[in-house]
């Protein structure tokens, strides 16, 4: 396997986004069966500015950048399936008011809402829940942080399980599987055909699912260093330390993607098992879409 391949991606509505050496490409299969590919040549901020490419810092920057790109590509893919007849008055007013800037505004609002929801559900809620144990049980700060971490992981697992049961999300998870199979095929130097990619597995160590799960684990360790002060101080510490948590996790994921050691396999195992929920077996037509996205992102004719 070629460990120098750094192409990554994301499943979108009836399509796949891939990020490669030649930019970002999103391929979507429209309702008439045609594959539309949109490509944007970009230079990552971590390469454009040296300071943003430093370890830990690059992880947080990449995390925010991935969120922005992910939201934009999701909005782009959904635009192919909008029903103009059922469009609300607000949607019509919004398009007329902001025109070309509308997508950027939606992306910014969606990013703020996504970050807010993530912080509330996976960081603040476990902190409030753990505070209940502090009031009712006489236990030390280390154990309280472990309990908080367990609650955080439990909420994350329940959330993933519940959304995996939604029918529309199942289609997205199938494209997620197509994305992984295509990347595996490319990493192994095989010809990029749906039949070849189909033979590969759908669980990939560099997946965002692995990243999110490891964030939960890394946060237990880092947040433990802050002790157990007042509730509002702990909440402040959690928010301030989020860039550090995401930065450290990024470095671990980056190492795991290149390492063949037993330790890397042990660390990646829980995230790989979780991908059994976030990826589903794709068909050849879905893999074909992923291949078109990868070829465009890597500049392959």
Image (cartoon, rainbow, N blue to C red):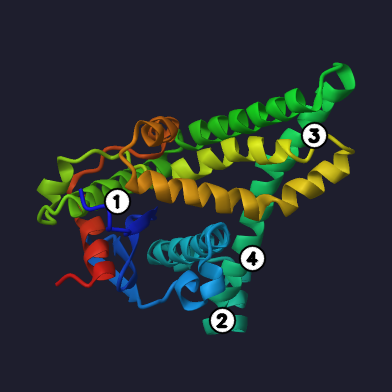
Element assignment for label 4: helix
Q: Which of marks 2 and 1 is nearer the N terminus?
A: 2
* Quadrant of the image occupied by residue 186: bottom left
Element assignment for label 2: helix
- Marker disc for residue 227: none
Element assignment for label 3: helix
Q: Mark 3 points at which residue?
A: 128
Toward the viewer: 14 or 254?
254
- Looking at the image, residue 50 lies above or below residue 235: below
Q: Name the residue under label 1.
A: 179
Q: Position of residue 31 (x, y in %)?
A: 28, 60
Q: Residues within 10 Å of mark 1 (few under 14, many from 20)?
A: many
Q: Which residue is drawn at 45% across and 41% down?
A: 210
- Marker disc for residue 101: 2
Element assignment for label 1: helix
- Marks 1/4: CA–CA distance: 27 Å
Q: Residue at x 24, y 38 (%)?
A: 201
Toward the viewer: 206 or 276?
206
């Amino acid at each position: 396997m070629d460990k120098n391949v750094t192409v990554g991606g994301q499943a979108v509505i009836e399509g796949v986004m891939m990020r490669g050496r030649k930019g970002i490409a999103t391929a979507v299969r429209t309702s008439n069966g045609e594959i539309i590919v949109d490509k944007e040549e970009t230079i990552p901020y971590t390469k454009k500015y040296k300071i943003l490419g430093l370890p830990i810092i690059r992880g947080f920057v990449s995390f925010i950048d991935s969120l922005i790109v992910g939201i934009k590509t999701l909005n782009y893919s959904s635009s192919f399936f909008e029903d103009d007849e059922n469009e609300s008055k607000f949607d019509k007013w919004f398009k007329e008011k902001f025109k070309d800037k509308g997508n950027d505004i939606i992306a910014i609002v969606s990013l703020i809402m996504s970050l807010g929801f993530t912080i509330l559900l996976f960081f603040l809620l476990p902190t409030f829940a753990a505070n209940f144990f502090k009031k009712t049980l006489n236990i030390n700060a280390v154990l309280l942080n472990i309990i908080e971490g367990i609650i955080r992981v439990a909420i994350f697992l329940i959330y993933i399980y519940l959304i995996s049961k939604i029918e529309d999300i199942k289609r997205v998870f199938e494209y997620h599987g197509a994305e992984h199979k295509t990347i595996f095929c490319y990493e192994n130097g095989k010809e990029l055909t749906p039949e070849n990619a189909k033979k590969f597995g759908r669980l990939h160590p560099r997946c965002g699912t692995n990243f999110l799960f490891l964030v939960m684990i890394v946060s237990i360790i880092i947040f433990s260093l802050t002790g157990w002060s007042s509730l509002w101080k702990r909440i402040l510490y959690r928010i301030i330390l989020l860039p550090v948590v995401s930065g450290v996790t990024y470095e671990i994921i980056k190492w795991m993607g290149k390492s063949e050691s037993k330790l890397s396999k042990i660390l990646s195992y829980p995230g790989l098992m979780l991908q059994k929920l976030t990826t589903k077996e794709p068909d050849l037509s879905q893999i074909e879409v992923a291949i078109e996205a990868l070829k465009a992102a890597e500049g392959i004719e």
